[in-house]
Amino acid sequence: MAKASEIKNGNILRFNGELVIVNEIIHRTPGKGGAFYLGKFRNIKTGKIVEARLGTDEQVEICRVETNNYQYLYEEGNYFVVMDYDSYEQFNVAKELFGPAAVYLKEGMDVIVSVESEEPIMAQAPNFVELEITYAEPAVKGDTSSGALKNVTLENGVEIKVPLFVNQGDKIKLDTRTGEYVERVK
């Protein structure tokens, strides 16, 4: 347990029985009354922003969270199985922790997982991945307008839009945060 005065931005707290990350903490000293801290917290599971007023001596629980790189091995139901590089220990991480980037994961990739009390609470896919195109629509001859795009299917079954010069069999770099084409990989 720690005092509210010891809270810093980025800390993960157990607040009202939920895990929250501190987005902002401000010390206020009003003209009347005692000083207090005004905090903005984001619930880790729901993403909901919560504001709270804490007394300077109010006790809060700062959680110990370990964040490490792991190797994504395979999918198992609603979970991804990842492996610790040091101990070779394997454990499950819920797909929803990766958010929309989960569809771009490929076996053998590095992922970042945050664990609190041996339970995964946050996960992040790499920002960029390289995937092969398994199907590409043929480009229409003469359609060379600036920024023209065509549909392709990636090796994981996801469909995206890419420039006309990209063909079936090419490897492309993709931004997992936006799902957009970045560049063709040689």
Image (spheres, rainbow, N blue to C red):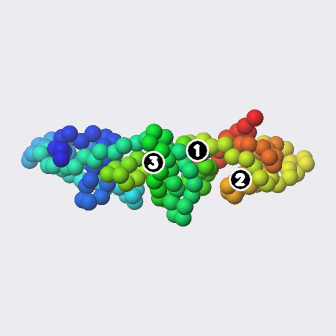
Spot occupied by residue 137 in the image (x, y as percentages of width and height): 82, 54
| Residue lying at the far bottom of the rendered structure | 77
Spot occupied by residue 115 in the image (x, y as percentages of width and height): 38, 49
Q: Could you tell me how far apart the alpha carbons at marks 3 and 2 are, in whole angstroms?
A: 28 Å
Spot occupied by residue 56 in the image (x, y as percentages of width and height): 14, 44
Q: Name the residue under label 2.
A: 155
The answer to whether residue 171 is left or right of residue 83 is right
- The disc placed on residue 36 is none
Label 1: element kind: loop
**Camera-nearest label, 1 or 3:** 3
Q: Name the residue under label 1.
A: 109
**Camera-nearest label, 3 or 2:** 3
Q: Earlier in the sequence, mark 1 or mark 3?
A: 3
In the rendered image, the vertical position of residue 36 relative to residue 81, given as above or below: above
In the rendered image, the vertical position of residue 59 relative to residue 76, given as above or below: above
Q: Name the residue under label 3.
A: 89
